[in-house]
C-alpha cells in the first residue's frame, strides 16, 4: 500500500487553503515560496526572485493521514524552476484543517509516478 490514496476530481472544499508559504531550502532559488489559489482550479507559486509557476488542480488525496489537493505544474520558466510544464511534476497541498501541514511533491519518470516526498512545513496566511 502506498502513502497516498488519491481521489479524482473532488469539489472545491471549504477546508482547502487559499494562501500559504513555506521556506524552501533547496535549489533553485532557496527562500520563501508563496502560494496563492487564483481560482477553483489554479494555484500560483511565487519564488523569491519573482519567478512564477502555475499549477492545475487534479484532485484530492490523503497523504500520511492528511487530506488535501493535488495539482500538476502547467506553466513557468523551466530553466529557473528546474521542473517541466507537462504535468510530470505534482504537488500535494494539505487542507487548512490538517494536523501536519506539509507540502509534498512527486515526479512522473518513464510513465510511473515516484513516491510522495515531503518538502517543508506550510504557514497558512489569509
Image (tube, rainbow, N blue to C red):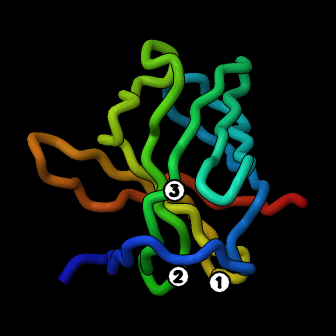
Element at badge 3?
strand
* Crowd around label 2: few <14 · some 14–19 · many ≥20 (10 Å): some
Q: Position of residue 118 (x, y in %)?
A: 45, 59
Q: Point out residue 55 in the picture as x, y percentages from the top left corner.
A: 53, 43
Q: Quick one: label 2 or label 3, which is nearer the N terminus?
A: 3
Answer with mark 2 or mark 1, whichever residue precedes in sequence. 2
Earlier-in-chain disc, 3 versus 1: 3
Residue matched to label 3: 57
Q: Residue at x 50, y 76 (%)?
A: 10
Residue 66, numbered circle: 2
Which residue is rendered at x = 46% and y = 35% of the image?
A: 74
Q: Which image quadrant is residue 6 in?
A: bottom left
Q: Position of residue 62 (x, y in %)?
A: 44, 80
**Contact, mark 2 vs mark 1 (Cβ under 8 Å):** yes
The answer to whether 118 is drawn above or below residue 26 in the figure is below
Q: CA distance from mark 2 to mark 3?
A: 17 Å
Q: Is residue 44 left or right of residue 117?
A: right
Identify the residue position indicated by label 1 in the image.
99
Mark 2–mark 3 contact, CB under 8 Å?
Answer: no
Amino acid at each position: 500500500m502506498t502513502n497516498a490514496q488519491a481521489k479524482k476530481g473532488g469539489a472545491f472544499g471549504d477546508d482547502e487553503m487559499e494562501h500559504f508559504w513555506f521556506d524552501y531550502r533547496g535549489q533553485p532559488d532557496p527562500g520563501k515560496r508563496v502560494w496563492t489559489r487564483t481560482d477553483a482550479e489554479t494555484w500560483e507559486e511565487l519564488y523569491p526572485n519573482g519567478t512564477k509557476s502555475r499549477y492545475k488542480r487534479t484532485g484530492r488525496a490523503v497523504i500520511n493521514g492528511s487530506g488535501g489537493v493535488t495539482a500538476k505544474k502547467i506553466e513557468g520558466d523551466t530553466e529557473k524552476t528546474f521542473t517541466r510544464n507537462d504535468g510530470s511534476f505534482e504537488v500535494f497541498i494539505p487542507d487548512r484543517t490538517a494536523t501536519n501541514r506539509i507540502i509534498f511533491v512527486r515526479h512522473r519518470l518513464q510513465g510511473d509516478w515516484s513516491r510522495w516526498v515531503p518538502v517543508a512545513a506550510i504557514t497558512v496566511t489569509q
